[in-house]
Image (cartoon, coloured by chain):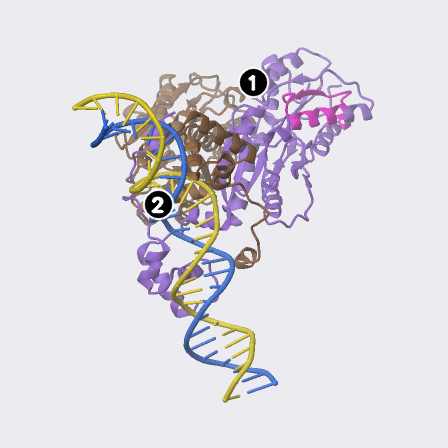
Chain colours: A purple, B brown, C blue, D yellow
Amino acid sequence: MADKATRTPRSRPPRKWPSMAEVAAKAGVSSQTVSRVANNHDNVDEATRARVLAAMQELGYRPNAAARALVTGKFGAIGVVSFDVGAHGNARTLGAIADAAREAGFSVNFMGIRAQTEAAVRQAFRHLMLQSVDGIVLVESQMLDTTSLHLPPTMPVVVADGDTGHQYPNVDFDQASGTQSVVSHLLELGHRTVHHVSGPRDSFAARRRAETWERTLVAAGAPVRPTLYGDWTPESGYLAGRTLAQMPEATAVFAANDQMALGVLRAMHEAGRSVPGEISVAGFDDVPEAPFFEPPLTTVHQDFDVVGRHCVTLLLEQIERRGNGPRRLAVEPTLVVRASTAPPPA
Amino acid sequence: MADKATRTPRSRPPRKWPSMAEVAAKAGVSSQTVSRVANNHDNVDEATRARVLAAMQELGYRPNAAARALVTGKFGAIGVVSFDVGAHGNARTLGAIADAAREAGFSVNFMGIRAQTEAAVRQAFRHLMLQSVDGIVLVESQMLDTTSLHLPPTMPVVVADGDTGHQYPNVDFDQASGTQSVVSHLLELGHRTVHHVSGPRDSFAARRRAETWERTLVAAGAPVRPTLYGDWTPESGYLAGRTLAQMPEATAVFAANDQMALGVLRAMHEAGRSVPGEISVAGFDDVPEAPFFEPPLTTVHQDFDVVGRHCVTLLLEQIERRGNGPRRLAVEPTLVVRASTAPPPA
DNA sequence: CTACGTGATGTTTTCGTAAACACGATGTAG
DNA sequence: CTACATCGTGTTTACGAAAACATCACGTAG
């Protein structure tokens, strides 16, 4: 590592911002008074405050976050560990978290992880703790073993859209409810059963959707066909779709997300099986593109903004030690019926 | 604001991490030696280093980033200001920036802006400077007036995918080259001209694409039809598509991004105009879904990962004051021909 | 044998801020 | 008219780490 090499030789003088002391000198007050003005304390004379503000303005003073954090022990930052921001849902969740955090006066320290491995998650956590955050939100990260993260018990954590087999507060969509609504919708249209293209086996959300799909079929007395597995990508949906296209008895498919549903649609087009005439296809997520697929996709709408904001709310509750709120929050998704589902062919 | 109220009453003792002094005491050395071990300096005896490391391990020592930043003047963090992470390209760029930053030992302070206004950008900058970062990457943020940002001249900035009318280093796709390749492709297929569905007028990338579209047509002696404006969303593309569907002479459409192209496709399907039989449609971006559209979309592939990494490279060059690298970096996009484009009907 | 370099370590100082505490001036209640 | 709160402000100190400087033990060249 060139770690030391890049750190040692540099000199600091060129970049220097005015400190409280300099502002204080210019305004003819003590630095403590400047501090009081900076933090909006009310026990400062209006005239004095004005003088200080003027001095700040003139010198272009900016409070030094490091010094403040050092003395207060708070950083005004939350960490977000997220898997694959390329995925629409994760990106939207991150955006919502960032918005909510900013409104609460917190900044967001983002850390993406490529591989869904425990080592990657742990490394991300370590990094965040080095960077010093007041709390951490974990987005769609299946933690294989929470205890091995070696988090200090005092670090507030909220888990979004992930495993619930842990001690931390959790925010997630009600996967069961959403899944049940699509599967029931298809059954009610008259389909004898519904095939499922699942997300990867190590995804908590994918497992929940697959479980609920099966349970709903069983409850309705419908036969359960073998699950096809994808990895959330359109490609994997396409491959599953090619398999399904060769099964004449398949009349309804529930894909675990919209991207895979798109792949299924493509496979059906290529195989000449009309959707929804011969076979119905439904997705999950309701990405912005879904209404414009061919045909427009029936899917389950998820409001990622709500999830993101809830995450911040729960996290701030922990940070500010008013740990009264609910530990688990389930956001209700809603079925959106479009043109890709219809009764089976007679 | 409950600002003061939430800050005043809290006591700090409960959450406390071991400091260097405690580690030093346990290891029987001075805190300076602990510092040397923590920073991997080489002038420490192996036995001593081992003792210190053991003590660190035992106490669960974590360096305090605030204290370090205070004394070094560096924060080990870069800020990213980005517009709408819901958009695929921005999200991907952010992800790449985060990866590259982490590899370089930097963390990423993310700040999303909702409104593409100068005030929003300025506020984001102010916030970031408060949070103290070593440099800033601005992603797809059209700064109306750079000078008004009141950035200290010493703050390193890199602009990605945005306006170039400013003093900062810039990383972007070669919009002209990409656009020219699609438009030429369509003309070479025999289309008399190409219609354009542009992105919003205040987007730099959209303007560049529109300009190049027009220039390419003019250079080829093709007539220039009025531009239709969208806002990057599939909806806006759909609306433009409905207009185009009613123009029998329109045989080729170039949409400024894939989402709008999808909207155009949808409009064509609804109007019963076959793609590419009667009308060809091309996009820009090559989102992962594009190969699975109906029909698979001809588009321009952009490698956002490369852009993100370049951003970090250029930024670190500035931060480390080796300002030798290129000030403008253009990443070459590549035309991807799929099934949505074909020669015009005879 | 001494002077001096070198490597390992300790001591002191500094960074910018906010809390704790101190202080004088003014107001007010008994 | 004194005792005592209150308000505005200054002084001191602590936060944790790292740089600058100091020290000490050794080894070696002159």
* Residue where numbered disc 1 is placed: A235
Front position in the image: A230 or B251: A230
Q: In which quarter of the image is the C terminus of chain A?
A: top right
CA separation, marks 1 and 2? 40 Å
Question: Left or right: where does residue B62 sit relative to residue A163?
Answer: left
Tell me the magenta residue range. A186-214
Q: Which of A55 and A255 is in front in this view?
A: A55
Q: Position of residue C23 (x, y in %)?
A: 43, 71
Q: Which chain carries label 2?
A: B
Where does label 2 land, which residue?
B144
- Is A189 part of what is drawn in magenta? yes
* Residue nearest the viewer, comparing B120 with A116: A116
Which residue is painted at 33% across and 47% down in the image? B151
Task: State which chain disc 1 sits on.
Answer: A
Residue B311, horizontal then vertical, whole percent: 37, 31
Asked which secondary structure carries label 2, the reply is: loop
Residue drawn at (64%, 27%), measured in percent from left and top? A145
- Name the residue type under label 1: Glu
Describe residue D1's horizontal placement relative to residue B185 as left or right: right
Q: In the rendered view, would you say A31 is above or below A229?
A: below
In the rendering, at what x and y percent does residue B46 appear? 43, 25
Q: Is residue A37 visible?
A: yes
The image's mark for residue A28 is: none
Q: Report the side of A282 relative to A16 (left or right).
A: right
Q: What residue type is labelled 2?
A: Leu
Q: How far across and down, in percent of the image, does residue A215 sit?
A: 78, 25
Asked if residue B86 can be seen in this view, the reply is no
Is A194 colored magenta in this rendering?
A: yes
